[in-house]
Amino acid sequence: MVSAEATENLSGWEGILSPGEQVLWQGRPDPGFQMAVGNGGLALFGMFFASFAGFWMVMAAQEPGPFWLFGLPFFLIGSGIILSAVFWATFRRRRSWYTLTDQRGFIATDLPILGRRLKSYPISADTVVEYQPGALASIYFGSEERSGQNGAYLVPVGFERIAEGDHVLGLIYELQQKAKEGGA
């Protein structure tokens, strides 16, 4: 069943949805602040980096000339690390929109510099679905490969911090059940 909100927001989907594809649900993540648990170490590193650069700048400023300015880029980098570790996930969620169709999940974002992006992830009978229950549930149904210092790694992708988690999970399970019945 298509929600009233999903029916109202179908304009603009022309050319994006496959013929016969139907929107089942649309929503947004909770905009409230939440820092990811894994980002605490990164924030501490940024604090150390910025603090050391700040200390160096103060000590260098005691000497004549603008030599202290050489520490400014390092201070700004450390501050940027802190800000991204603490606020990036919340900022990204505030600029994200979710759509579930009878074939796939869409995640739309509108971020500064990166611009508008719309990514889709097919949902089939074989799709591994991870559910994190709660008042603000998260449902992961895809992954993306990212590059890091130690090589490539996978990041789970899905609908994060949504209030209707149980309902959306039920819709996904229905899609998977229909896919199993259609493929058998």
Image: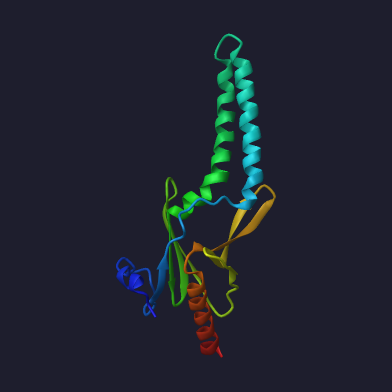
Q: Nearer the viewer, residue 22 or 79?
A: 79
Extreme top residue here? Answer: 64
Extreme front residue here? Answer: 135
Q: In the image, is residue 85 above or below residue 110? A: above
- The part of the image, by quadrant, that contains residue 59 is top right
Give the quadrant of the N terminus.
bottom left
Which residue corresponds to the image point at 57% horizontal and 68% vertical from the top-left?
133
Residue 165 in picture, x, y percent from top left:
50, 69
Q: In the image, is residue 43 above or below residue 96? A: above
Extreme right residue here? Answer: 150
Which residue corresponds to the image point at 56% horizontal and 11% vertical from the top-left?
65
Residue 113 in picture, x, y percent from top left:
43, 45
Q: In the image, is residue 58 above or below residue 11? A: above
Give the side of residue 13 with respect to residue 36, left or right.
left
**Is there any visible trace of residue 145 in the rendered image?**
yes
Q: In the image, is residue 122 above or below residue 89? A: below
Residue 43 in picture, x, y percent from top left:
62, 41
Q: Nearer the viewer, residue 101 or 16?
A: 101
Q: Nearer the viewer, residue 172 or 145?
A: 172
Which residue corresponds to the image point at 41% horizontal and 72% vertical from the top-left?
25
Which residue corresponds to the image point at 59% horizontal and 52% vertical from the top-left?
36
Give the side of residue 11 with respect to residue 131, left or right.
left
Give the quadrant of the C terminus.
bottom right
**Is there any visible trace of residue 159 in the rendered image?**
no
Look at the image and name its color scheme: rainbow
Residue 50 in picture, x, y percent from top left:
61, 31
Count of all numbered marks drawn on residues in the image: 0
Give the side of residue 60 with respect to residue 174, left or right.
right
